[in-house]
Image (tube, helix red, strand yellow):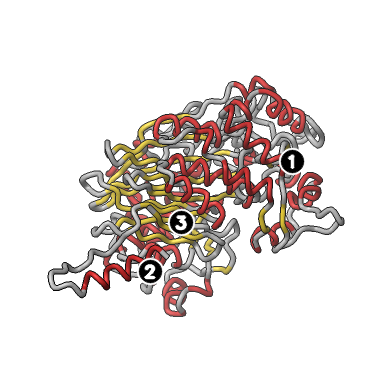
Amino acid sequence: MRLAIAFAVALWVGTSANAQPAKPHHDRAMVDAANPLAVEAGLKILRAGGSAIDAAVAVQAALGLVEPQSSGLGGGAFLTYYDAHTHKVTAYDGRETAPASATPTRFFNADGKPLSFSEAVLSGRSAGVPGAVAMLALAQKAHGRLAWSGLFGDGERLAREGFIVSPRLGGLIGAGFAQAKAPDVLAYFTNPGGDRMKAGDRLVNRAYAATLRRIAAEGPNALLKGSIAADIVARLSQDPLPGGMTLADLAAYQPHAAEALCRSYRQWIVCEPNAPSGGPATLEGLGLLARTDIAKRGPNDPIAWFELAQAQRLMYADDLKYVGDPAAVTVPIAGLLDGPYLDARAKLIGDQAGPPPAPGQPVGAPKVGPDATREPGGTSSFVIVDQWGDVASMTTTVEGPFGDGRMVDGFLLNNQLTDFSFQPIDKDGAPAANAVGPGKRPRSSMSPTIILDANHRFVAAVGSPGGMAIPAYVLKSIVGVLDWKLSMQEAVNLPNLIAIGAYYAGEADKFSPGVLRGLADRGIVVRSGLGAEGSGLHGIIRRDDGRLDGGADPRREGVARGCC
């Protein structure tokens, strides 16, 4: 209606003898997230004068309800935030932590052998102390414009009145993986008549509404202290394999805020959260690609995709070897992103894909063993730009679909600690950088990205779910928008290709036959199937004329909508 009225007024003015051409209207703000209900929750906050961070709180509150397979109050997150006034980029770490009782053999059975992955996920040992809400509270205190207590209205209303189960959620409810069959998940998604819920059904969650009311009134202490914290501890202390989390573990949780990790990529500046996120891997991948001619090529050139795949293999080899919680282990970030080191590694890209590349030896690298981590996907990512030009790029997760399958007070708990290496030492006794430890944050692949120009003005933001494939998805999109000059939607739509070691997987049916032949000629045969969670890319570009160009991954149910 607003656009129709604006058009009519412009037409009337255009008939005046002295009329000037009407300037095009551009939305000054935008929310791009994985569910339209969450997008609308964020837009309401922006229309009310809220900041990007205020809207992020509302979006997460809604996503935890309507997309519980991917994120929620019981999970963790990384957030990269751009302040348009100061031109500074801050990284917020809301990664879950292991309880104080955690030992390197946390995922061993009584015989001293690693548990199977499904055993570990469904155990009480898989959940870490949730950090997403505490992280958002820290960021909102610094950058919010509205009262914290007023940011949960849409999420609370949707939980109290009910929402319609989406096709994606409905499909996962009926899926065959372990968490979907867990007792709490079965109970939650069963209708009063005893039928399994499906797409199109209305789901009411009054317990979630009550929890949101408490968080609105008490902040993160509503989860980390008091009766909800006691419920978390009690649920995780139950069989199978109790987890050992205590009230003291929850009360001790602290989110982190620090200057973002930023590096140049051609004429741009790309900013990421620091370790243990996937940000260092994404920046290493870009550093390698900057030493190729990929920018002179395009999405229909097999050599471009070969270069992208080879850069991925090199960045993953280093990431899986060296990245862990920097509070507990030495992570050689400076060495991994150092120019001479990247020069040497980029020479390994070559023109034929050979055996899996070994990790490099960057300056400052400690002696660590190989990693043995499986990282399934139960994650979501969103981007918000507010009317002042501030930007929030956030990736949020409960780890596996429906987390660990255990539910308290209307929300699911995470299985984030299964992101630790199940094998803590190698045959020579060298510890894995990502071994389990008390209070430690597990390595993550989450890479919520913000891109600036040389004058530190906002250019673009993007992020994705996808487990270990996240840096691959984000790299593809950055190359698409910066090097190949695609719209954000076109970049998001590009085929996915994941290259780790000897493993190449992706959307073979979306590549042209010529690209597939060209890759095969260079030793890369793309196998269909992503081997992890598919992408859920969301991103926004600010064009030179001020227009916001959003893109939402068609592989999910998200939308990008502007306002204000």
Going by the numbered disc 2, the residue's amino acid type is Ala
Report which residue position mark 3 lands on.
538
Q: Residue 406 bears which disc, if any?
A: 1
Residue found farthest to the top: 248
Q: Using the rendered view, name the quadrant where residue 244 is placed.
A: top right
Is 434 or 349 nearer to us in this picture?
A: 434
Front position among marks 3 and 2: 2
Q: Is residue 106 above or below residue 308?
A: above
Residue drawn at (19%, 68%), measured in percent from left and top?
A: 21
Task: Give the mark nearer the N terminus: 3 vs 2.
Answer: 2
Residue drawn at (73%, 49%), measured in percent from left and top?
A: 179
Going by the numbered disc 3, the residue's amino acid type is His
Of helix, strand and loop, which one carries label 1?
Answer: loop
Q: Using the rendered view, name the quadrant where residue 91 is placed.
A: top left
Cα separation between marks 3 and 2: 28 Å
**Could you classify mark 3 by the number of other residues whose Cα lies within 10 Å: few (under 14), some (14-19), or many (20 or more)?**
many
Q: Residue 4 bears which disc, if any?
A: 2
Q: Using the rendered view, name the quadrant where residue 172 is placed.
A: bottom right
Going by the numbered disc 1, the residue's amino acid type is Arg
Cα separation between marks 1 and 3: 28 Å
Image quarter hosting the N terminus: bottom left
Of helix, strand and loop, which one carries label 2?
Answer: helix
Of helix, strand and loop, which one carries label 3?
Answer: strand
Is 317 or 125 nearer to us in this picture?
A: 125
Residue found farthest to the left: 18
Task: Provide residue 263's location: percent of width, then percent of height.
Answer: 30, 43
Residue 343 in view (yes/no): no
